[in-house]
Amino acid sequence: MKLSECPYCGKEMERGFIQCRDGVYWTKKKQFIAALSSWGKGCVSLANGAAISSSAVYAYKCDSCKKVIIDYFADDK
């Protein structure tokens, strides 16, 4: 399900991208070297089809709440 309405305030969100040269990952702990985030225990790639590699992900931004929401494909290691 693609977002268009903010789940916090109900206002419309704008679709865009979050990009990083080395991929976009969620990790439980901050990595000492960001480029090694993909090696973190329990890391999850946030790749969601925005790019062939994991260097860009679609994200939805709410100007009212100052929140960014990312839907990701489950790509557990």
Image: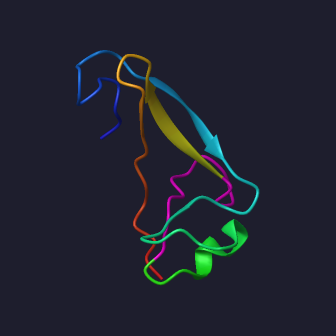
Determine the residue positioned at 40% across, 22% down: 13
Based on the picture, tell me whether residue 31 belongs to the magenta stretch.
Answer: no
Determine the residue positioned at 53% across, 41% down: 58
Based on the picture, tell me whether residue 51 belongs to the magenta stretch.
Answer: yes
**38 or 57: nearer the viewer:** 38
Q: Position of residue 9 (x, y in %)?
A: 23, 21
Q: Position of residue 11 (x, y in %)?
A: 29, 15
Secondary structure that dominates the magenta span: loop
**Over which residues does the magenta segment extend?**
43-55
Q: Is residue 59 above or below residue 35?
A: above
72 left or right, relative to 20: left
Q: Position of residue 44 (x, y in %)?
A: 46, 70
Numbered disc total: 0
Q: Is residue 56 above or below residue 15?
A: below
Q: Position of residue 2 (x, y in %)?
A: 35, 36
Location of the N terminus by quadrant is top left
Q: Is residue 74 above or below residue 38?
A: above
Question: Which quadrant of the figure has residue 72?
Answer: bottom left
Looking at the image, which residue sits at the far right?
Answer: 21
Question: Which quadrant of the figure has residue 18?
Answer: top right
